[in-house]
């Protein structure tokens, strides 16, 4: 009988406590809990079945998956900040120290931790893209430098050929003078002046 009386007293106390909470608060808390639980289970399942590479790293997330996950965590953080205040302040559904109070705060910590991990993954993706762009830039830079070196080498070779050609023609003139085939200097000028 005493046990039954204590159950009734406890039940009536709980009913009295929870009846004082407005219906809007119950609706909001139920909606935010469902919106947190269902997609979170989806993300956990996706992570569990993500293939693991031989080096132990996970398969990279697609941009779409990363974007959806980021929007989801950002929404949850923005939704849980007022929700935790609403739930744990006096008159809220988790205002008494107990399971609801602790689980509400633990959930908020996990939501913030999820957002921090998403930021980490997003920054890692940005870092990887920058590294790919840097490799591509270095590859193009090496091609340009090689092409420039080829052009310079070709210019040097053509200049050397030209210089050799000019020095050969000078050598030919010298040979012609030695043989006596070249016209003496001034003979042309003398003819032009006489006319």
Image: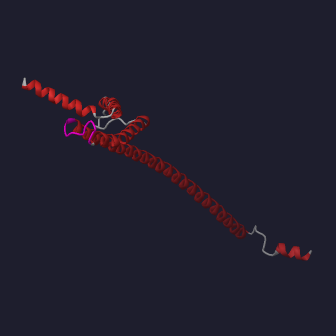
The answer to which quarter of the image holds residue 36 is top left
Which residue occupies the foreground of this view, 12 or 44? 12
Left or right of 181, for residue 163:
left
Q: Which quadrant is the C terminus positioned in?
A: bottom right
Please say whether residue 173 is one of the residues in the magenta stretch. no
Which residue occupies the foreground of this view, 53 or 139? 53
In this view, 38 is above or below 118: above
Report the label total.
0
Which residue occupies the foreground of this view, 188 or 101? 101
Q: What x and y, as percent, mark residue 3?
A: 8, 25
In this view, 162 is above or below 2: below
Which residue occupies the foreground of this view, 187 or 136? 136
Q: What x and y, as percent, mark residue 91?
A: 27, 39
Q: Which quadrant is the N terminus positioned in?
A: top left
The answer to which quarter of the image holds residue 173 is bottom right
Q: What x and y, as percent, mark residue 120?
A: 34, 45
Q: Residue at x 50, y 52 (%)?
A: 141
Toward the right, the furthest residue is 195
Please say whether residue 91 is one of the residues in the magenta stretch. yes
Q: What x and y, as percent, mark residue 162?
A: 64, 60
In this view, 89 is above or below 187: above
Q: Residue at x 53, y 55 (%)?
A: 149
Q: Residue at x 78, y 73 (%)?
A: 184
The answer to which quarter of the image holds residue 62 is top left
Q: In the rendered view, how is the structure colored?
A: secondary structure
Left or right of 59, for residue 182:
right
Stretch in magenta: 90-99
Q: Dominant secondary structure of the magenta stretch?
A: loop
């Amino acid at each position: 009988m005493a046990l039954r009386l204590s159950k009734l007293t406890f039940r009536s106390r709980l009913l009295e406590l929870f009846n004082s909470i407005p219906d809007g608060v119950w609706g909001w808390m139920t909606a935010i809990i469902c919106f947190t639980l269902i997609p979170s289970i989806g993300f956990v399942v996706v992570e569990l079945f993500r293939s693991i590479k031989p080096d132990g790293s996970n398969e990279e997330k697609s941009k779409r998956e990363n974007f959806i996950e980021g929007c989801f965590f950002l929404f949850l953080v923005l939704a849980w900040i007022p929700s935790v205040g609403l739930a744990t302040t006096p008159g809220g559904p988790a205002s008494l120290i107990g399971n609801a109070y602790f689980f509400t705060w633990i959930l908020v910590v996990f939501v913030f931790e999820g957002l921090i991990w998403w930021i980490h993954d997003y920054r890692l993706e940005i870092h990887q893209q920058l590294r790919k762009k840097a490799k591509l830039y270095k590859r193009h830079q090496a091609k340009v430098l090689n092409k420039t070196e080829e052009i310079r080498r070709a210019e040097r070779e053509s200049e050397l050929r030209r210089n050799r050609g000019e020095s050969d023609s000078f050598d030919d003139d010298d040979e012609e003078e030695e043989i006596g085939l070249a016209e003496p200097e001034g003979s042309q000028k003398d003819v032009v002046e006489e006319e």
